[in-house]
Image: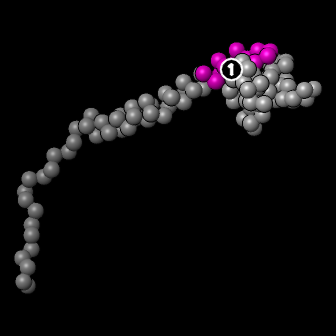
Amino acid sequence: MFINSAYAEGAAAQPASGLMSFAPLVVIFVVFYFMLIRPQMKRSKEMKSMLEALQKNDEVVTSGGELGRVVKVGEHYVTIEISANVEVLVQKSAIQSVLPKGTIKAAN
C-alpha cells in the first residue's frame, strides 16, 4: 500500500477526577438558579403580596385586559366595577396588576 498504518502511542489518557467531571453540572445548575429559578420565585412572591394587599377602591387590570375598580374583595374572588352599574366577579388570580389611583379617569 501507499499509506503506512498509524499506531497509537503507549501512554493512555488519564481519567478525569470525580470532582472535575461534576463541575460542568454544578456550573449549569448555578446558572439556571440565578437566571431562571430565582427571578421566577421573586416574581411569584411579588404577585402573592400584591393580591393579599388588594382592597376596595383599588384600580386593577385583569389578565383579560378589563380595567376596573375593586368593589368587593373575598377570599378567592374579587368584584370589579368596569363601568357604571356593571360589576364583574373574577378570581383573584386573574388580577394582573394594581394601577395608580386616577388611572381609570385618565384612560377615559
Q: Residue at x 79, y 27 (%)?
A: 68
- Quadrant placement of the C terminus: top right
Among the 4 quarters of the image, the one containing residue 79: top right
Among the 4 quarters of the image, the one containing residue 18: top left
Q: Residue at x 73, y 26 (%)?
A: 106
Q: Residue at x 7, y 59 (%)?
A: 9
Q: Residue at x 81, y 21 (%)?
A: 70
Q: Is residue 71 above or below residue 31?
A: above
Q: Is residue 67 above or below residue 4?
A: above
Per the image, the residue denoted by label 1 is 100
Question: Tag 1's secondary structure?
Answer: loop
**In the image, residue 82 lies at what x, y percent?**
84, 29
- Name which residue type carries label 1: Pro
- Seen from the viewer's position, the closer of residues 107 and 73 is 107
* In magenta segment, residue 53: yes
- Quadrant placement of the N terminus: bottom left
**In the image, residue 11 lies at what x, y percent?**
8, 53
- Seen from the viewer's position, the closer of residues 84 and 77 is 84
Q: Is residue 102 visible in the rendered structure shown here?
A: yes
**In the image, residue 15 lies at what x, y percent?**
20, 45
Badge 1 density bin: few <14, some 14–19, many ≥20, Cα 10 Å: few
- Seen from the viewer's position, the closer of residues 26 and 88 is 88
Identify the magenta region. Answer: 46-58
Q: How is the image coloured?
A: one colour
Q: Residue furthest right?
A: 85
